Image (spheres, rainbow, N blue to C red):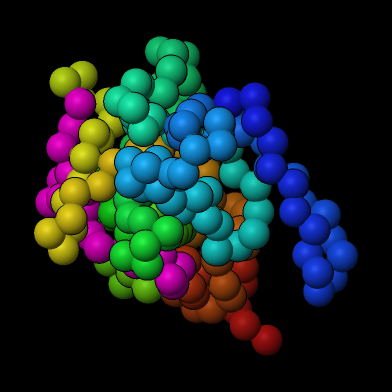
């Protein structure tokens, strides 16, 4: 929740972790009440939206509605900066129903890649972030808000969820041939992300 902080120390490693809330998605739960179904869903969706297969930080825009139906505030500058529609995320970690993601933008082309592959994927990369399951495109499951900026609900396996919608910056989508061997690209003899001769050279 906005202005709240959660701290945890791993009993195995002794490492301290701190998470600071900023979106106010689950006000009741933050106030000490049991999490409602809507709070469970939106918190699960937000966690899923921040999943990163490569473990590197990438700034994103997070849009949607909180557990009581209020819109997460955003500005036109935010939408302009994060101009690439990325994905929708939904599910419920609390009940074991699973976590799901779907592309809001077009699938990545053969020569494109991104560290945000848990949300914006290629057709061939739908199992990249298990246990987060990629299920295709948001339009098949989800309903847009009246401004067509974010999704207000997504239905999957007969269950309707409160989702989170994400946007990203164009520079966080890489293309084989752009002159830099990115974390998501590999050496090879072709022009795909997994065999990018132009940026990463031939494999030894």
Quadrant in which residue 118 is drawn: bottom left
State the quadrant of the C terminus.
Answer: bottom right
Quadrant in which residue 132 is drawn: bottom left
Residue 200 picture location, percent across and down: 62, 68
Determine the residue positioned at 43% across, 71% down.
131
Is residue 110 something one can see in this rendering?
no
Q: Is 188 one of the magenta-colored residues?
A: no
What is the total number of numbered labels drawn onto the structure image?
Answer: 0
Residue 61 picture location, percent across and down: 47, 32
From the viewer's side, name the closer residue of 84 and 187: 84
Residue 6 picture location, percent across and down: 69, 43
The segment highlighted magenta reads 129-145
Seen from this angle, which residue lies furthest front? 33
Q: Is 131 one of the magenta-colored residues?
A: yes
Q: Looking at the picture, does residue 27 appear above or below residue 122?
A: above
* Image-based side of 186 in relation to 173, left or right: right
Residue 72 picture location, percent across and down: 41, 23
Seen from this angle, which residue lies furthest bottom? 204
Q: Looking at the picture, does residue 115 appear above or below residue 22?
A: below
Is residue 164 something one can see in this rendering?
yes
Q: Looking at the picture, does residue 100 appear above or below residue 85?
A: below
Seen from this angle, which residue lies furthest top? 76
Determine the residue positioned at 80% across, 58% down.
9
* Image-based side of 140 in relation to 63, left or right: left
From the viewer's side, name the closer residue of 181 and 45: 45
From the viewer's side, name the closer residue of 83 and 8: 8
Determine the residue positioned at 37% across, 73% down.
127
State the quadrant of the N terminus.
Answer: top right
Determine the residue positioned at 82% across, 54% down.
16
Q: Looking at the picture, does residue 15 appear above or below residue 172?
A: below
């Amino acid at each position: 929740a906005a202005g709240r902080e959660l701290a945890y120390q791993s009993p195995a490693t002794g490492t301290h972790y701190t998470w600071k809330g900023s979106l106010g998605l689950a006000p009741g739960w933050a106030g000490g009440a049991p999490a409602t179904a809507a709070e469970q869903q939106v918190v699960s969706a937000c966690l899923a939206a921040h999943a990163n297969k490569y473990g590197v930080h990438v700034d994103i825009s997070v849009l949607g509605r909180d557990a009581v139906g209020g819109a997460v505030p955003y500005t036109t500058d935010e939408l302009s900066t994060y101009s690439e529609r990325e994905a929708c995320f939904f599910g419920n970690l609390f009940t074991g129903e699973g976590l799901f993601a779907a592309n809001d933008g077009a699938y990545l082309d053969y020569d494109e890649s991104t560290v945000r592959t848990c949300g914006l994927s290629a057709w061939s990369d739908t199992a990249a972030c298990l246990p987060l399951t990629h299920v295709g495109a948001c339009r098949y499951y989800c309903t847009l808000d009246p401004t067509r900026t974010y999704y207000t609900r997504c239905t999957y396996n007969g269950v309707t969820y409160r989702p989170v919608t994400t946007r990203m910056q164009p520079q966080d989508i890489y293309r084989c041939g752009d002159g830099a061997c990115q974390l998501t690209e590999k050496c090879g003899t072709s022009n795909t992300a997994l065999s990018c001769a132009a940026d990463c050279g031939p494999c030894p």
